[in-house]
Image (cartoon, rainbow, N blue to C red):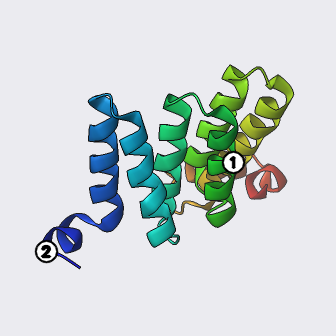
Amino acid sequence: MGRHSRIYGIDNLHSALGDALMKTGDIEGGLAVYRDAVKAHPDQVDLRRGYAKVLERSGKVAEAIEGYTEAIRANPQTVEFHEDLAELLERSGRVEESIAEYDRVIDLLTDQLRLKPENWTIRRLGLALLARGKPGEAMA
């Protein structure tokens, strides 16, 4: 692994190269960089997401949907992966599927909000409910 790989991370280097090629109009080159990176580093979930984004930008919608789905399979708790998929499904006219995916996003965000111990809003709400004599609601 080269010096830059250690500093920036494999996924960042491949993403930067793939994105640069796309911006210069070399769509096939950008796709090839991401495709090779995903094959070489299948554990790098952000590369899968980047590849899906590049597929989407190049008009390969069905492949992009599969790419986002693979990223979600690898890391189902990452909200951004679900948001990307929901937006693409919506733009593709697959409204019912996009609604289901947006619902997953809301569920994930709700769960994450509840799980954050530093979330003072939830603590303050609980204390306010307790002060109002509503311990059942405070514990929900």
Q: Nearer the viewer, residue 82 or 23?
A: 23
Residue 60 makes an appearance in the image: yes
In screen coordinates, is 45 left or right of 108?
left
How packed is label 2: few (under 14 Cα within 10 Å), some, or many (20 or more)?
few
Residue at image coords 82%, 37%: 100
Q: Nearer the viewer, residue 114 or 27?
A: 27
Residue 115 is situated, as x and y percent measured from the top left of the image, at: 61, 61
In screen coordinates, is 125 left or right of 98?
left
In screen coordinates, is 3 left or right of 108?
left
> Quarter-wise, where is residue 10 in the image?
bottom left
Mark 1 lies on a secondary structure that is helix
Residue at image coords 32%, 56%: 14
How packed is label 1: few (under 14 Cα within 10 Å), some, or many (20 or more)?
some
| Quadrant of the frame with the C terminus | bottom right
Residue 126 is situated, as x and y percent measured from the top left of the image, at: 66, 51
Badge 1 is on which residue?
66
Residue type, numbered disc 2: Arg
Q: Tell me if label 2 and label 1 are in contact, CB under 8 Å.
A: no
Badge 2 is on which residue?
3
Residue type, numbered disc 1: Glu
Residue at image coords 71%, 24%: 90
Q: Nearer the viewer, residue 131 or 12?
A: 12
Residue at image coords 33%, 34%: 26
Which residue extends farthest bottom?
A: 1
Mark 2 lies on a secondary structure that is helix
- The residues tagged by marks 2 and 1 sit, at their Cα atoms, a distance apart of 33 Å
Residue 41 makes an appearance in the image: no
